[in-house]
Amino acid sequence: MRRREFLKYGSAMAAFATVSTSLPAILSAQTSEDAPTGEEADFDLEIVDVDVELIDGSIVPMYAFAPTGKEPSIPGPILRVTQGDTVRIDIRNSSTRPHGFQIVGQTNAVVSGLAPADGDGEDKMRIEFVATKPGTYFYVDGDNSPINRVLGLHGALIVEPKNGYADGKNRKKPMPYAPGAATPAMKSLFTALGESTIDGEPARFPGKPWQKGREYVWIFNQIDPAMCRRIGGGELVTPAEFESQFHPRYFTINGLCGLDSAHDKATCPTGHAGEPALIRCMNAGLATHSPHIHGNHVFVLTESNKNGLPIYQTSLNEHDVWTMPPMMIKDVLLPYTAPPDVPPAPWKMVQEKYPLRYPMHCHNEISQTSAGGSYPMGLVTDWHIDGPVATS
Amino acid sequence: MTTIYRPISDPLEFDTFGCHPFENDPATPDRTNRQVFLRRQVADWNVDMKDGSQLQFWGFKDPDVSGSDSPWPSKLIRVKQGQVFHCEFKPTKGAHTIHWHGIEPTPMNDGVGHTSFEVKSSYVYQWCAHQAGTYLYHCHKNTVLHFEMGMYGVLIVDPLTKSPDTNNPNYLYDPLPRDEVSDITPGAPYSAESILVFDDVDPVWHKLDHNAGMCGDDVGLDKFNPTYFLINGVHNGRTQTDSRTVTRMTAGRNLMLRVANASYSRLHITLPFNCYIVEVDGRPLRTNRAKGWFSAPEFKAAGSRLEVAVAQRYGIWVPEVPRGDHRIIGNFHHWITNKRHFDGTAIAKIVAL
């Protein structure tokens, strides 16, 4: 089966494709769940030069990925596969500069030095690998690092488990990880979601279990318009020069700033209390962000190591601020509980406005600016609780 | 070449999102009986910096306490878990808010302009903390500037019970039936407490108007070049001698070290003793399935480094502190280059006798 699977960033009920023989993965431990699924996932991507309109109306030259023949976007489209799939990605460089492509954290998934296409249609490069550990991965142009990546060539590869259920045979508690490799704390958390009592005690997560597809992707990046214009104008800037002179003035989440990201349905989580959501956080830029969420703490489930592989956490610390250095990927669970510090009273409260609207913003507040000032143009979005606990 | 356009948006929404947020003085919605009441107003004052210059700072003063006009950080608030808390806020110097950082009340009580309102002249915030731990409170109007200007304080929610250990009578949190906590004594009992808030200051920002940059004008808020580094408002030349940053305690007893990062830097803390991280962001690290906790304390050997993200808090439990002077070293690193700032070190001290 050959499929081309592209998704826009954001929540989507996705059931997807996939596989073949399992190749030895150097970077990740093999589990029985890495066995071939017999499915294949095929993607065609193109690298293009683009002009990007920023929130203040100014335009900067950047690079972008596009499904071949379709509209480009920054970040590039989500590539979603299933553990054990044989993933093939064909890359064409339709930019005026040389580029590369890489899935960080997957073996056999790098090409570099891809010359600009000359239009004869024979100039694609292919990578092929078997998707291994479920989780969130960066795909980037790893050439000229970090310039090409920060100038727009980044996106998410999501590896879903073949059999992601926290409660094994019952299959009532879906989980975005394979049970054989998930930590006891991860399985325990996903088992607890949707329970109104546990061991006879009132429990914390009444409502629904996590449901496959109830997820969001937040990719952070920063834009230095002066650098974009210098590079777009043909100036040769070395990576060392880029890093030392990088002065970001726009701070984006899924390519959007402030007001725009808060209104973007794919970025702004919505739902009732009791509808837990997975948020896959990624930082493609050079700044270290401190995302801070109001209204609920999140559970940090995974944290990528320096090779880009998700490390499943044995201790699921709850944070209202979590640190995101460059190229960090963290899957966090937003439990979507009723705000826990409302005084004891029947809920929903009668005088409060609905939906309950809370921000998520980077607390390194310099990131809340754009072009020198203004909160509504920064790295901020909202999330909504539309009403009281939803039950299955 | 393809152009990626930004989405079409309503200019009016941009205006209310952050440029001119809704100002109001509503009655507290769903108001209920309180167990704690306090007041806050806005103050400004000058602080002597390390090089002898003076800079203006802003903060929250308590009008019921004399001498609280130059509070930086603003006066510590301590409440007990489960108490209904009311704070009457009268900003008096233009619209401001109080965001109870880490506390999760309704949006009206969350203190964020674009999701509710900014307080024009008076509002009573209401919440009831369900979990003991370490929190902050700070202004969330033009937060970029107002947080840097010093408008923050520490908020601690204490548990209901006392420890039976008379040498270490205070708990970080209430131990509960079915808690599983490896290595440490459940509740993390302590006798001495050191609360350290690290901050950095760019003097250029301290000359700006309080609405600077809110409507997108270029006032330089994307350039932060700190030259002063402080703990609890004490500059780094004095932090090893000032009573606000030196904690004296009896050797052999337990210490609760609470650390917060109010700077705009990556803060790397070096811990001088064997210790355990027992709380992050107001949540104790323990496993209690019925209560929804799935974590464990983390051991840190003497000499370990801990990165504290901007606005994060850590509760660090040090059992049986050895006799001697213990230096807690905070290094401030640039948020993009990760290079340590010039003079970017501040050191607090625990003296165990």
Image: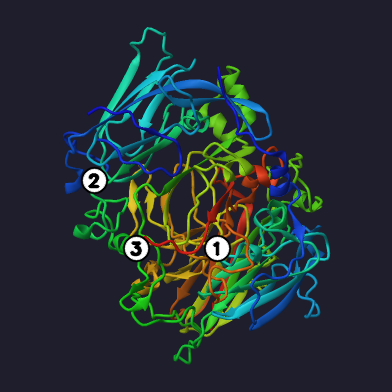
User: Left or right: A246 with respect to A200?
Assistant: right
What amino acid is at disc 1? Ile
Q: Is residue A138 visible?
A: yes
Name the quadrant of the N terminus of chain A. top left
Q: Nearer the viewer, residue A340 or B313?
A: A340
Residue plotted at (58% across, 43% down): A263
Q: Report x, y in % for residue B264.
A: 62, 53
Have a look at marks 3 and 2 and say if they share a chain. yes
What amino acid is at disc 2? Lys
Q: Which residue is mark 2?
A: A162
Badges 3 and 1: C-beta atoms under 8 Å apart? Answer: no
Have a look at marks 3 and 1 and say if they share a chain. no
Q: Report x, y in % for residue A213.
A: 37, 47
Q: Which residue is mark 1?
A: B329
Comparing labels 1 and 2, the label whose residue is closer to the camera: 2
Q: Which residue is mark 3?
A: A189
Q: Report x, y in % for residue B250.
A: 52, 85
Q: Is residue B272 visible?
A: no
Badges 3 and 2: C-beta atoms under 8 Å apart? Answer: no
Characterize the local packing of mark 2: few (<14), some (14-19) or many (20 or more) Cα atoms within 10 angstroms. many
